[in-house]
Image (cartoon, grey):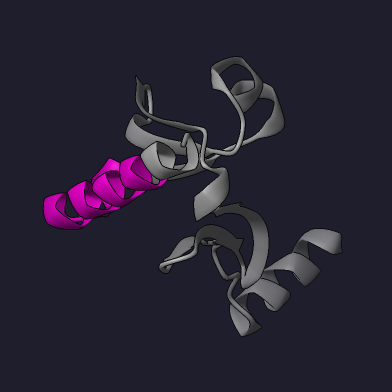
Amino acid sequence: MLFLGGLVTNSLWPPVAPSLDLEIDDNEIRAVWNRKVIRTVRRDRVRYVREWSGVFGTRLVVSEHGPVATRFLGYIPVPKRLLEAEQYERIKAQALGWMASSER
């Protein structure tokens, strides 16, 4: 019975895949999951910007924390495979510039 209900419900209202969006402006970078901001990093607080390569591909990691704390306290991933090369390099240059200015 429950199985039948699931079939009817999914046929009437198809499930929406969750999405992760990045919002980048002059002051901060935000990770948005299903229209809800889940993490922000302000330009004056960037302490760690690196490219990580792994099973899921290369991604740029932007964080307010140092290299060790980033893995435990969180970061904003910018996946390289989902962006055009020019966009990815522009975001990378902007984040590296923010890190250099916040170290002063």
Question: Looking at the picture, how far across and down is residue 7, in whole percent?
Answer: 68, 69
Instruction: Specify whether residue 59 is painted magenta.
Output: no
Left or right relative to 69: residue 16? left
Query: How many numbered tags mark residues here?
Result: 0
Looking at the image, which residue sits at the far right? 1
86 sits left or right of 10 in the view = left
- Which residue does the image show at 77% across and 60% down from the upper left? 3
Residue 39 seen from this side: yes
Residue at 33% x, 40% y: name it: 96
Q: Residue furthest bottom?
A: 12
Instruction: In the rendered view, tell whether residue 21 sits above or below residue 82.
Output: below
Write down the quadrant of residue 81 in the picture: top left
Estimate the x, y position of residue 67 in percent, counting from the top left: 54, 19
Q: Is residue 38 left or right of residue 85?
A: right
Give the image location of residue 99, x and y in percent.
Answer: 42, 39
Residue 79 location, quadrant: top left
Residue found at x 71% / y 76%: 9
Q: Nearer the viewer, residue 104 or 15?
A: 104
For residue 38, above or below residue 8: above
Q: Give the magenta range.
A: 79-98
- Looking at the image, the residue that sits furthest to the front is 104
Q: Where does residue 14 sit, x and y in percent of width and height?
A: 58, 75
Quadrant in which the N terminus is drawn? bottom right
Viewer-side residue, 51 vs 97: 97
What type of secondary structure mainly makes up the magenta span?
A: helix
Residue 8 lies, with reference to residue 80, above or below; the image says below
Asked whether the viewer can see residue 79, the reply is: no
Q: Is residue 66 above or below residue 90?
A: above
Q: Residue 95: within the magenta?
A: yes
Residue at the image position 49 percent from the left and 53 percent from the top: 43
